[in-house]
Amino acid sequence: MPPDAPTDDERPSPALASPEDYLGDICGRHQVVLLGDQIGVRQHLRFLAGTLGELADNGVSNLAWEFTNSRRQVELDALTEASAWDDRACADLFVDLLGAGFGYQEYADVLHAVWKHNQAERRRDSDRRPIRMIALGLPTYVEDPDLLDGRSAAEIGLRNWSLGGHYRDMSAFHAASVLTTEVLRRGERALVYMNIAATTTGLVEWADRTPTTSAGNLLWRWMSDGCRRVVLHGAVADTTATERVEELVSRSPEGRGSTDIRFGLDLVASSLGSVAMTEVRGSVDGAETSLRLRDVADGYVYLGPRADWEPCSLIDDLLTDANFGSAEARYRALDPRPESYSRDELEEVRRNGQQELSDAWPPLPEPPEEPKPRFARFRKNDA
């Protein structure tokens, strides 16, 4: 008689998937995967640039992000499909976002990686699998500073004076609309790389006891299982949960004695999914309630402890004689004053923004206090 089939407990557990393989796999299982991150983490942008092969192998033909403006889509397409790479054209795409601080080399490196991938695929005449970059950045008041009438574009919660409504809500509807037109109606797949707040799906976050809207919320309510959220370790603004995840990883069989463990996994059946959220506030059923990590995201990518994060570097020579006028006007819309800003002042703004990247990240857990030294008491006759 054949031996009894092994039970689930007896089967050897598979090795953890690499982050690249996992991201490609979950993208191959769902039409849209939202990858949530903090802004300006060097290692995460390098990881993203290194996943293109796995994404293409799993049928993903689009990489969407919010870090270039949608109005520059034609130029973005031309850059990533050109026969020769153009550093200047790439840098100019980020000048629109000067005030928001995305003039960083690692973001440009993602575009360069897409171009290199597409060049390689062009040589595979019989089986071409290119990646198209899709810009989700919302053209706003900053495109026409005169609409502000001397007001700062950054005041009153970043209101969009030209379109009306709160900027976060407007950008959510804009991103969902672009993805619908450029991906869903074409029956294609996409990885969507955005800031962590924009990628919530079933979770509705609350701010001042008011529910917020995200691009992920809108897509998930329409697509349900066709849409999934993956978060990078440390991106969720919950210090206690982040510390707990790192503790569980260090105590796991794979993590013992290893300082460079990297993996990606689904959270629904993982012990990491049970980690409690103590700082994230939101709802998955209409009422604000306690949450666990599996309520916040479907998948998790661990590239290492958050203490290792490094900020992105500035693009050299971002500002030129040709683009300075428009860049200065956009920045003055964010921080208005009667006189124009000089080139040196804007370069100082860029340097300060780069130095402040890590200040916007969730704070690291406080190190435990060292015990105070205890001094023995000596009696007079002990000398």
Image (spheres, grey):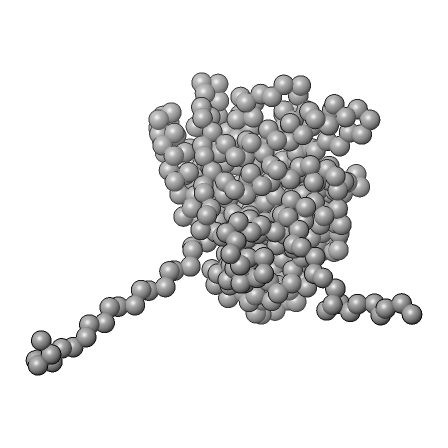
Q: Quadrant of residue 87?
A: top right
Q: Position of residue 109 (x, y in %)?
A: 56, 31
Q: Is residue 316 above or below residue 187?
A: above
On screen, residue 153 versus residue 220, left or right, reads left
Q: Residue at x 46, y 48 (%)?
A: 308
In the foreground, 136 or 192: 192
Question: Residue 94, can we see it?
Answer: yes
Q: Is residue 173 visible?
A: no
- Please tell me how many numbered marks the rendered image carries: 0
Residue 201 locus on image (x, y percent): 65, 55
Q: Position of residue 131 (x, y in %)?
A: 70, 33
Q: Is residue 252 above or below residue 100?
A: below
- The answer to whether residue 20 is above or below residue 134 is below
* Residue drawn at point x = 72 percent, y = 48 percent: 25
Please tell me in which quadrant of the rendered image residue 52 appears.
Answer: top right
Return the x and y of residue 295 as percentages of the image width and height: 63, 63
Q: Quadrant of the N terminus?
A: bottom right
Q: Residue at x 63, y 47 (%)?
A: 19
What residue appears at the point 68 percent right and 46 percent down from the top-left corner?
21
Towards the viewer: 100 or 280: 280
- Is residue 260 shown left or right of residue 181? left
Quadrant showing the C terminus = bottom left
Q: Nearer the viewer, residue 44 or 40?
A: 44
